[in-house]
Each structure stands twice: as C-alpha cells, then as structure tokens.
Amino acid sequence: MKTTQLTVGKMKCEGCTSRVEEIALAAGALSASADLAQKSLILEFNPDFDLVALVGQLDAAGYPTTLDTKE
C-alpha cells in the first residue's frame, strides 16, 4: 500500500471535501481524506492505482490538483 498527498484547489466547503473524497474512492483509492484548511487530499492506494487519471478527474470536476508524493 502507498500513501500520497495531493494539493487540491477550489475546495470551499465541506461539500467540496466530500465530493473530492468520493471521486478518489470511485477511482479506486483505498482511503481518501480531504482537508479543507490545508487544501489537501491524503490517499492510500494499491501500487496499480492510476494517480494521473485521478488528477485528471479532479481537474475535470473543477478542483485543480497537483501531486506531492509522500511514500
């Protein structure tokens, strides 16, 4: 299992954090925890998880996302 932190922009409310977590879980993340104050998303995932695809999905949903890998 791996852990990664993403920086997620344009999260403005708890509804946004819930939506970001839902997108990550639907993409196959094992766990997802979004932090509104930190504008971050902590993910746990299997090695075959496609982070690039998730970043694209979050961007498409209106949440500009960058990768800050922590393993």
Image (spheres, rainbow, N blue to C red):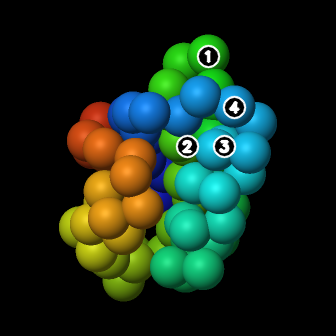
Q: Earlier in the sequence, mark 1 or mark 2?
A: 1
The amino acid beneath tag 4 is Cys
Q: Which residue is mark 1?
A: 37
Alpha carbon distance from label 1 to label 2 = 13 Å
Instruction: Give the position of the C terminus as an image quadrant.
Output: top left
The amino acid marked with disc number 3 is: Thr
Task: Tell me how far mark 4 sits from mark 1, CA to CA.
Answer: 10 Å
Labels 3 and 1: the sequence-earlier one: 3
* Dot 2 amino acid type: Ile
- Neighbour class for label 1 at 10 Å: few (<14), some, many (≥20)? few
Residue at 54%, 34% in the rendered image: 11
Residues at marks 4 and 2, CA–CA distance in whole angstroms:
17 Å
> Tags 4 and 3 in contact by the CB under 8 Å rule?
yes
**Residue corresponding to mark 4:** 13
Q: Secondary structure at mark 2?
A: strand
Task: Name the front one of labels 4 and 1.
Answer: 4
3D distance between C-alphas at marks 3 and 1? 10 Å
Residue 59 position by quadrant: bottom left
* Label of residue 61 in the image: none
Q: Is residue 11 above or below residue 65?
A: above
Q: Residue at x 39, y 33 (%)?
A: 9
Q: Is residue 20 left or right of residue 47?
A: right
| Residue that mark 2 sits on | 42
